[in-house]
Image (cartoon, rainbow, N blue to C red):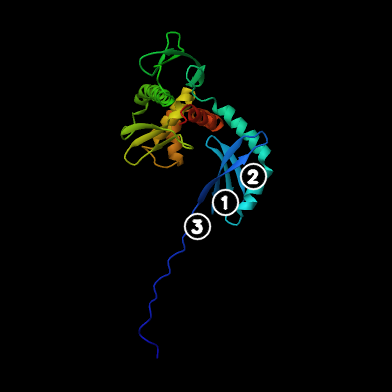
């Protein structure tokens, strides 16, 4: 006779996915320079991969690859890494150097920069459309970077102030607030509370590309996804969106890298 009772065993917990592991190693190039490489062991990776972007060099290893195999791969591609590192440095531009930096990027162009001594650290437009950076004698690099960031954010907010009223009609509401950040990949995001976050590097891009990202994020107030309805809403408000999206795909890393170099800590 079968028992009317069954022994109930506790369910076994699902195994946790292996965590992504990160550390850093240093590679010395043939010219004596040292490059710091971020080493990432990623369970999702299927092969060893080496990449270089505005954030630096990254060596990705799948779980089955040994550390020594990764180091051999890195050394085998040292010449490629050196070339990519140089190209990225050139694209990123020079750092902000007191009394030396000759120009600054803004709205898709390089504006000549004049340096002058002043009582406060401040970046302004000159009458001829160039820029003037006034700096006190004792101002440090951090003060210069803060002044530059404040200038870029003020100019970005001025652009938003001109464009935003043109797109509010037909939206359920306006963004709750707008913040500017430095991001590694995304150009913008819309939080559930209505906060619109935009990459500060957009103010370095041509205005049409910046305006497209604004319209893109505003349309997420209508559709939270990237469905055909969403793209139809973007098309209706900004017909040239494809060209501007393609521009950001081509020049995006350079723009982000340039801002990163100028505001580097």
Give the residue displayed 51% in from the left and 48% down from the top.
22
Mark 3 to mark 1 CA distance (whole Å): 12 Å
Residue identified by numbered label 2: 74
Q: Does 197 sit above or below residue 118? A: below
Q: Give the mark nearer the N terminus: 2 vs 1.
A: 1
Q: Give the mark nearer the N terminus: 3 vs 2.
A: 3
Q: Does 64 sit above or below residue 147? A: below
Mark 2 to mark 1 CA distance (whole Å): 16 Å
**Which of 63 and 4 lies nearest the eye of the viewer?**
63
Residue 255 image position (x, y, % from top left) = 51, 28
Mark 3 to mark 2 CA distance (whole Å): 24 Å
Q: Residues within 10 Å of mark 1 (few under 14, many from 20)?
A: some
**Which of 166 and 248 lies nearest the eye of the viewer?**
248
Indicate which label's residue lies in the foreground, 2 or 1: 2
Indicate which label's residue lies in the foreground, 3 or 2: 2
Residue identified by numbered label 1: 45
Q: Give the mark nearer the N terminus: 3 vs 1.
A: 3
Residue identified by numbered label 3: 18
């Amino acid at each position: 006779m079968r028992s009317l009772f069954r022994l109930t065993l506790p369910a076994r917990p699902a195994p946790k996915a292996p965590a992504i592991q990160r550390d850093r190693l240093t590679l010395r190039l043939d010219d004596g320079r040292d490059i710091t490489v971020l080493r990432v062991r990623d369970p999702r990776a299927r092969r060893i991969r080496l990449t270089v972007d505005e954030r630096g060099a990254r060596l990705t290893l799948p779980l089955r690859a040994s550390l020594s195999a990764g180091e051999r791969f890195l050394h085998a591609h040292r010449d490629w890494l050196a070339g990519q590192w140089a190209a990225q440095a050139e694209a990123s531009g020079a750092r902000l150097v007191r009394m030396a930096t000759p120009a600054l990027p803004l709205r898709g162009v390089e504006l000549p920069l004049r340096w002058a001594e002043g009582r406060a650290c401040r970046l302004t437009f000159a009458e001829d459309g160039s820029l003037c950076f006034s700096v006190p004698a004792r101002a440090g690099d951090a003060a210069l970077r803060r002044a530059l960031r404040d200038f870029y954010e003020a100019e970005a907010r001025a652009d938003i102030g001109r464009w935003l009223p043109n797109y509010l009609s037909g939206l359920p509401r306006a963004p709750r607030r707008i913040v500017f950040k430095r991001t590694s990949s995304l150009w913008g995001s819309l939080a559930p509370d209505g906060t619109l976050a935009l990459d500060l590097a957009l103010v370095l891009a041509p205005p049409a590309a910046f305006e497209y990202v604004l319209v893109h994020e505003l349309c997420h107030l209508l559709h939270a996804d990237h469905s055909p309805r969403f793209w139809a809403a973007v098309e209706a408000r900004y017909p040239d969106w494809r060209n501007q999206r393609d521009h950001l795909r081509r020049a995006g890393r350079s723009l982000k890298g340039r801002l990163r170099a100028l505001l580097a800590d």
